[in-house]
Amino acid sequence: MIAPWLFWTLLALASWGVWALLSKLIGDALSPGQSQALSTIGLAPVIVGLAFSKKLGTSGKRKRGVVLAFAAGVLTCIGNIAYYGVLNSGAKAATVVPLTAMYPLVTMLLAVLLLRETLNRVQVIGIVLSLIAIYLFNVQQEQQVLSTWLFVAMVPVALWGISGLLQKISTNTISGERSALWFLLAFVPVALFLILREPHPSRISARSWFLVILLGLTFALGNFAILLAFANQGKASIIAPLAGLYPLVSIPLAVLALGERIGPREWIAIVTALCAVAAISIETKTLAAQPAS
């Protein structure tokens, strides 16, 4: 039977894979800031569901966990804004922005250094394979990796990576449901700020409204799932790189929805990603069998 933390991690991977495709489908219909602000509407069903959940829990150091979860949400929002800023910076930025998908590396390193998470050989192999797959999925022009735009793109990488660590620590003191609730609530004031800051488009099509709301919903479901993975004794150093393989879902969907083609590089990345998932899954089963014996 699949371990709970692995199930929730794979659900997060699937949700973020759909989310990544939706951002492409929206295209130029909305500015990055507008997409970020309006997609908050899609968070509402998850927030309401969590608010009335009977699994919020009251044990543990609730105040500390809430503060950490809210701080993680704020950092993620700021990272998103920095990411969108890079997107609007021109062609050179567009070649470096895909590097932001490497943020799980930051979470993994921080978890090993600060949380003293231990890794065995199978886990190390799975993590290395997942990082290789993330690189192959996202970095297309190696000759420009060391450009000055790299330092701009590293802002969201650092913020998202730190946010992942704070999410994990938060679930050590409060339930995954409560952590997810406060993490998502942090997006509301940021959305209000963006709405007041940016001019509202004169007309938004029904298609754009549907896509941007679905964008927020899939983002919220992914973060809810990842927090439940952390809460179910999952290691941040494993969950972060595994969840970062969401292109494994978005690329096949892009082929179906947008008619995009998969090249040799993408095929290698897909096979590498599947091997990474298999390596981590086999280790999970081994760990699960030990207490029974």
Image (tube, rainbow, N blue to C red):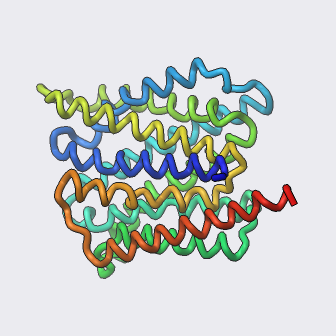
Kindly identify the residue that appears in the image at 66 percent across and 21 percent down. 54
Residue 48, placed above or below residue 168: above
Labels in figure, total: 0
Q: Position of residue 191 (x, y in %)?
A: 38, 30
Q: Residue at x 39, y 46 (%)?
A: 80
Which image quarter is the C terminus in?
A: bottom right
Residue drawn 42% across the image and 48% down it: 16
Residue 212 at x, y percent in the picture = 28, 35
As drawn, the residue found furthest toward the right would be 293
Q: Nearer the viewer, residue 230 or 109?
A: 230
Left or right: 120, with 254 as reference point: right
x and y percent of residue 132 in the render? 47, 74
Q: Is residue 245 left or right of residue 206?
A: right
Give the percent coordinates (x, y) of residue 111.
Answer: 67, 59
| Residue occupying the point 44% across, 54% down | 156
Q: Residue furthest bottom?
A: 143
The image shows residue 260, relative to residue 24, as above or below, that is below
Left or right: residue 213 compared with residue 151: left
